[in-house]
Amino acid sequence: MKKFLLVTALAAVSISATEANWGGFYARGGLNAVGTGVTDKLKDTAVKGKDSFSLAASFEIAAGWGMILSDAVYLGVDAQVGNFNMDYKSIEGSDSKTIFAWSPNLQARVGLPLKSAMPYIAGGLGFQKIVSSTGKDTLPEGNFSWSARVGSDFKVTENFFVGVYGQFVKALNEESGEGDLKTTKGTSATVFGFNAGYQF
């Protein structure tokens, strides 16, 4: 880990006096930590004992394309084809469940292409899919979400880069029941991670 952090810190000066090529296609993979919260609400009041929070590790696979405008602005599209994670957690002290989740996202990305670093912001839409679970609770099949991301990539060579990022994902609320028994479930996740990729 220390070696990886050292490489990331030195990446900003790795391509001395030349401009890094940030345009074109790229592919990357990364590891991150995910904090996920689920809140059940009945008429805008949290249902007692139903709030939960969990931490998990996740693996991200992504690809994208971008272009440089006037040597000053990066515009691109980033497709996170897989954010895969497995999570085990206890609920209400007795029940437990194991979850395998898949969360693809499609984002527009805007960056500042510097000599060997590119800070950026991104945002878009996605989908959260629960593939399997065990326990007493029945989990939703999946639902749409929106996401926002901020980070920076650093060139190590002309084609190889590393990066750090943070991302927030908010699933669109789900409603069930009728009248006084109508319940709204909201899910959100905060992600922090490292990635490495190749610029074609």
Image (cartoon, grey):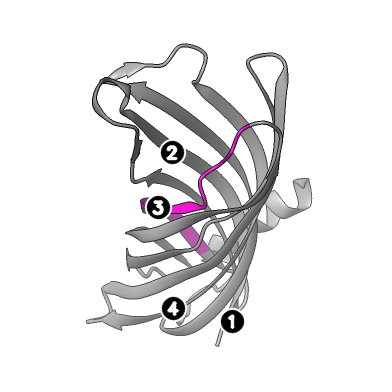
Main SS of the magenta part reads strand
**Residue 131 in the image, given as x and y percentages of width and height:** 63, 55
**Image point 58% across, 41% down: which residue?**
34
Are circles 4 and 1 on residues that touch, CB within 8 Å? no
Provide the residue designation for mark 1: 159
Residue designated by label 4: 22
Judging depth in this view, the residue of 109 and 135 nearest the camera is: 135
Task: Tell me how far mark 2 sits from mark 1, CA to CA.
Answer: 34 Å
Circle 1 Cα neighbour tier, 10 Å, few/some/many (<14 / 14–19 / ≥20):
some
Tell me the amino acid under the disc marked 1.
Asn
List the residue tagged with mark 2. 188
CB contact under 8 Å: marks 4 and 2? no
Read off the residue under disc 3.
149
For the residues labelled 4 and 1, the Cα–Cα distance comes to: 9 Å
The answer to whether any part of residue 28 appears in the image is: yes
- Frontmost residue, 172 versus 112: 172
- Name the residue rendered at 42%, 44% in the picture: 168
The secondary element bearing badge 1 is classed as loop
Among numbered discs 4 and 2, the one appearing first in the sequence: 4
Residue 21 position within the rendered picture, expressed as x and y whole percent measured from the top left: 45, 82
Secondary structure under the numbered disc 2 in the rendered image:
strand
Of labels 3 and 2, earlier in sequence is: 3
